[in-house]
Image: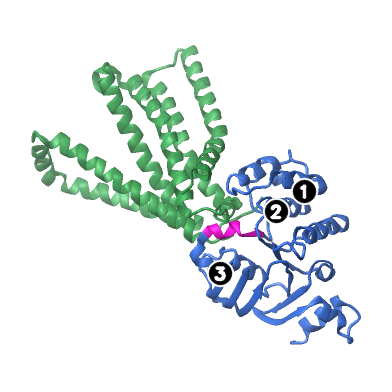
Chain colours: A blue, B green
Amino acid sequence: MIELDGFGVDFSAFSLGPLSLTIRGGERVALVGPNGAGKSTTLKGICGLLPDGYLGHALVDGREVADVGPEVRRTVGLLPERMLGFGWMTVAEHLAFLSSFFPDWDGARVAELLRRLELPTDVKLANLSKGMQVKLSFVAVEGSRPPVLMLDEPTSGIDPLMRKEVVDLIREAVPEDSGRAVVFSTHILEDVEAVAERVLLLRAGRLIADTSVAALRADGEHGSVSEAIYSRLTAHD
Amino acid sequence: MTERPLRKLVELEMRRARPILTQTMLLGAVVLALLWALGWSTPGRASFVLGVIAVSGLWAVPTSIMRDKLDGGMEFLTALPIERTTLAAARLLAVLLFAVPAGAVGVLAIHVMYGSQFTGLGSVHAALVWFGALTLGSTVITALVVGVSCRLEVRHFSRLALIAFLAFVSLGELSDHLAPQWKPAALALAARPWFPQALVAGLLCAAALLLWLSFHLARTGFERYKPGRDRITW
């Protein structure tokens, strides 16, 4: 589904990679690392959203992202770190606008998500709280039903109750036998165990571990998955 | 380039311009009514108010680009699954749609100001020629502003304004200096029988070239846009 081969970027102040890995349908992958580790850059690169391109190869369904162009975003849906849209539009107008760009827009799924996430449709985007923005971004990305979901910190800034709802929705959106895949970045280590089976640990632009939640859980030295992740991230200091 | 996204993007521009157009037209109508009621109405004043209404409509699209760069709208648009050519084409189509009513208001303003003896507006043919010329001229100028606004970062605008001002002043000085030499030659050229047709053909070619340049600038502006560089927040 997604293949990275020597993928990376080389900016003057930051470099990422080279990353080489494969993500298959049905996988739920957590991308974990401190601020500036390269999580958002990786997600944006796979979505073809790096204006200066990337090094190496990023393939989605066997096609190079750079060659596919913006159309790749019909296959790979991104929930960005910061909500994108026009502040003067209401939630309903924003979703209606987006639906014009996705031929497979699923209006019934959008209505269901709006109800479950208790999102009012008549509020302007500029007046949404951070949590509401995250929720709307999730609805927007799920509306187009892309085969791959890229979620950049989908549970940040929302209250614990709603966080559980979002975690459940992510699990529900990508069942193991669905053929869909989700890659999500997070700083909330509890969410890793709640959602993912596979964990990629990034630090300073380098992939320091590509492991599974089961392997982290089985690591006898640490009391929990969160502690095992923390230990591996800090082991390189 | 698919039709539905293009239509949606043009509709977006129309909708964004609606408040400023409505406000300007209402304000213009109030000012015209006041001028008439107070007995201060002159052709010059009425024509000026009509001109302001026409120009405000034309500026709706370029100003929306600057706003998009500041409030994250550009980031949103460039993240949509559509080619940059569609984004650029939508802006220029919106420019054309706004230029049509602006051209009509412009003809009205000229008529109010000068009457039929100068414009020849007594005939429908002359009115149509003026309408076509004003619409095309305003489309080209506004499209160029749209292209430059897309291509340049907001922080470069002040530098561009300074360069444009210096170029304008320098060209004025230069033409004043050269006028005694080229004026007789220009008058002789204008007296040739083929001159009007050649002038129109030349202006149409220049308009086509400038429209192509505007489209190129807008497309590459969307392609090279770096998210967050000009953004303030909302």
Instruction: Tell me the magenta residue range.
Output: A70-79
Label drawn at residue B97:
none
Locate residue A56, reporting x and y percent.
53, 77
Distance from the alpha carbon under mark 2 to that under mark 3: 23 Å
Locate residue B176, reporting x and y percent.
20, 45
The residue at the point 64 percent across, 53 percent down is A84
Q: Chain of mark 2?
A: A
Asked if disc 2 and disc 1 are in contact, CB closer than 8 Å, the reply is: yes
Name which of mark 2 and mark 1 comes first in the sequence: 1
Distance from the alpha carbon under mark 3 to that under mark 1: 31 Å
Q: Quadrant of the N terminus of chain A?
A: bottom right
Label drawn at residue A142:
2
Name which of mark 3 and mark 1 comes first in the sequence: 3
Q: Where is B92 relative to A195, above or below?
A: above
Distance from the alpha carbon under mark 2 to that under mark 1: 9 Å
Locate residue A232, reporting x and y percent.
78, 83
* Residue kind at label 3, given as amino acid type: Gly
Q: Is there any visible trace of residue B157 in the rendered image?
A: no
Q: Where is B220 relative to B57, above or below?
A: below
The residue at the point 9 percent across, 42 percent down is B185
Seen from the viewer's position, the closer of residues B190 and A153 is A153
Q: Is there any visible trace of residue A60 in the rendered image?
A: yes
Identify the element where label 2 is drawn.
helix
Locate residue B168, reporting x and y percent.
31, 48
Based on the picture, tell me whether residue A77 belongs to the magenta stretch.
yes
The residue at the point 72 percent across, 54 percent down is A138
Asked if disc 2 and disc 3 are in contact, CB closer than 8 Å, the reply is: no
Identify the element where label 3 is drawn.
loop
The residue beneath circle 3 is: A62
